[in-house]
Amino acid sequence: MTTLDTYTAALRAFIMQRPRFELANYGGCFRSYNADYRQCLADRDDALEMLAHVTRASDSAMMAASIADALRSGRVEWNAETAEFDYCTGQYFPTEYRNAACQLLARALWAYWRGNVPADCSRDTMARTARNALGKRLARRWFN
């Protein structure tokens, strides 16, 4: 079983890799290029905030299991041989991979919190948990 430290180090490397935008893909339109670049930076910041919360989990084995469970859906895949995350691109890697990391982290945190609350808790309770842990902005963007 992969440890939380291994997952978080690999996730940090995955998130921090350069996006490699190509201006030629934007037909020279700097406005579109800059908009995508700004969104990529915002996704990076969100992913790093959620990753910091993941690293502070009180039960690291349970959080690692939550990450493994979250990997079952989505485009981010774990390569156990290289201990790295891979991404299956849908349209354009630079605009997608950090967003996919955020989605993975949100699913993992949700599963982790779900394991630490009563079985009969509502979706509202889970959203409130996300808001209390991560703040309104992140909870609104990734947990609604």
Image: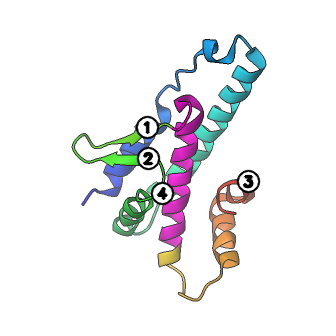
Q: Look at mark 2 in the image and give the residue it sits on.
A: 76
Note whether 121 is above or below 86 in the view shown: below
Q: Look at mark 4 in the image and give the residue it sits on.
A: 54
**Please, what is the three-letter code of the amino acid marked with disc 1?**
Phe
Q: Look at mark 1 in the image and give the residue it sits on.
A: 14
Q: Earlier in the sequence, mark 3 or mark 4?
A: 4
What kind of secondary structure does the magenta stretch mostly adopt?
Answer: helix
Note whether 73 is above or below 85 in the view shown: below
Is residue 109 a member of the stretch shown in magenta?
Answer: yes
> Is label 2 in a helix, a strand or a loop?
strand
| Disc 1 residue crowd, few under 14, some 14–19, many 20+, Cα 10 Å | some
Q: Which numbered disc, 1 or 3, marks the residue closer to the eye?
A: 1
Q: Are marks 1 and 2 in contact (CB under 8 Å)?
A: yes
Q: Are marks 1 and 3 in contact (CB under 8 Å)?
A: no
Note whether 58 is above or below 49 in the view shown: below
Label 1, label 2: how far apart the Cα atoms are: 10 Å
The disc at residue 137 is 3
- Residue 89, given in percent of the width and then of the height, sits at 48, 36
Is residue 10 a member of the stretch shown in magenta?
Answer: no
Q: What are the residue bounds of the magenta stretch?
A: 90-113
Note whether 139 is above or below 20 in the view shown: below
Q: Earlier in the sequence, mark 1 or mark 2?
A: 1
